Image: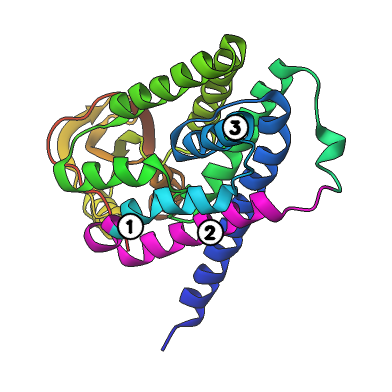
Amino acid sequence: MISGESARYTVKRILLLLLGSILMAFNINTFVHAGGLIPGGFTGITILIQQIGSRFWGVEIPFSFVYIGFNAIPAAICFKYVGKKFALYSVLVIVVSGFLTDWMPRMFIDFLQLHDILLSAVFGGILNAVGISLCLYADATSGGTDFIAIFISEKYHKETWNYIFAGNCVILAIAAWLFSLDKALYSIIFQFATTMGLSSLYHGYQQKTLLIITNKPDEVYTLIKERTNHAATSFKGFGYFGQAERTLLYSVVSAYETAPLITAIEKLDHGAFINVIRTEQLNGHFYTRPKD
């Protein structure tokens, strides 16, 4: 039986995913098409195939047919090896955004057909980042090459973003060769705006280092362990301000866990002094919450 809290979280997840899907479909039909842009990943491959079919063969290829087809095998692999709910929620995004891209009413689409390609690239990239971020906050993905990156990261603990970037470069090179170089270069701006937007909106893959000076080290450590499943290291020191012995707790947690954890620590120990540092590189064992 599903608890009330679990049901609310499921509804929240679905609403975020549907909103993200709508934004991504709307973005493709407005800024991307207006600028003739080629986004990265499977979305970019699908749009490139559509453009090739339209220009060279005179065939209008449905976006959803190609996009869902490309995502089928990566989704099945993630379902088996990463997480069943994670994969199913991601498939929901893929299917909804795919069909909406084909069927979305043109009431507002024609109104937003910008004639400035640079504006289309910048604001399209930002809107794309917002849509993807909503999916990530719902603990899912927008599909495409994200499936591949997450699978390799979970199974082999290796970064794949350089390979994905290389693949995107190949897609843009083909677009430049078949169509025009300027559209490919504007597409790089689109992808850059998406990357910068994601780094600002979503911090789930970042870590924060917490330096906590407290008089309740055992209670604070228990709180860190229960809330984040991360450990901490204790150091004894002397506080010159209060002329008393103090304890320093050192811990590294995920960025999205930082704010609620700090609030909980401050409620537990009103006199705690907390310094938060962005972790640029982390070597060694770090607990990562498994996908559901």
The quarter of the displayed image where residue 223 is located? bottom left
Looking at the image, which is closer to me, 184 or 122?
A: 184
| Of marks 3 and 1, the one in the foreground | 3
Q: Residue at x 17, y 48 (%)?
A: 155
Which residue is outermost to the left?
Answer: 284
Q: Amino acid at mark 3?
A: Gln
Instruction: Based on the picture, tell me whether residue 82 belongs to the magenta stretch.
Output: yes
Q: Would residue 290 be visible to someone looking at this image? A: no
Q: How far across and down, in percent of the image, does residue 289 sit? A: 28, 54
Q: How far across and down, in percent of the image, does residue 116 sit? A: 77, 17
Q: Residue at x 27, y 32 (%)?
A: 160
| Of marks 3 and 2, the one in the foreground | 3
In the displayed structure, does residue 202 sit left or right of residue 112? left
In the displayed structure, does residue 230 sit left or right of residue 102? left
Write down the residue under mark 1: 227
Q: How far across and down, in percent of the image, does residue 8 sit? A: 54, 73
Instruction: Provide the secondary structure element on which disc 1 rests.
Output: helix
Instruction: Provide the secondary structure element on which disc 3 rests.
Output: helix
Looking at the image, which is closer to me, 127 or 225?
A: 127
In the displayed structure, does residue 289 sit left or right of residue 184? left
Magenta span of residues: 77-106
Looking at the image, which is closer to me, 228 or 175?
A: 175
Write down the residue under mark 3: 51
Sequence-wise, which precedes: disc 3 or disc 2? 3
Q: Which quadrant would the N terminus be assigned to in this image?
A: bottom left
Sequence-wise, which precedes: disc 3 or disc 1? 3
- The span from disc 3 to disc 2 (Cα, nearest Å) is 21 Å
Neighbourhood count class around disc 1 (C-alpha, 10 Å): few under 14, some 14–19, many 20 upward: few
Asked if labels 2 and 3 touch by Cβ distance under 8 angstroms, the answer is: no
Number of the label disc, if any, that sits on residue 95 = 2
Sequence-wise, which precedes: disc 1 or disc 2? 2
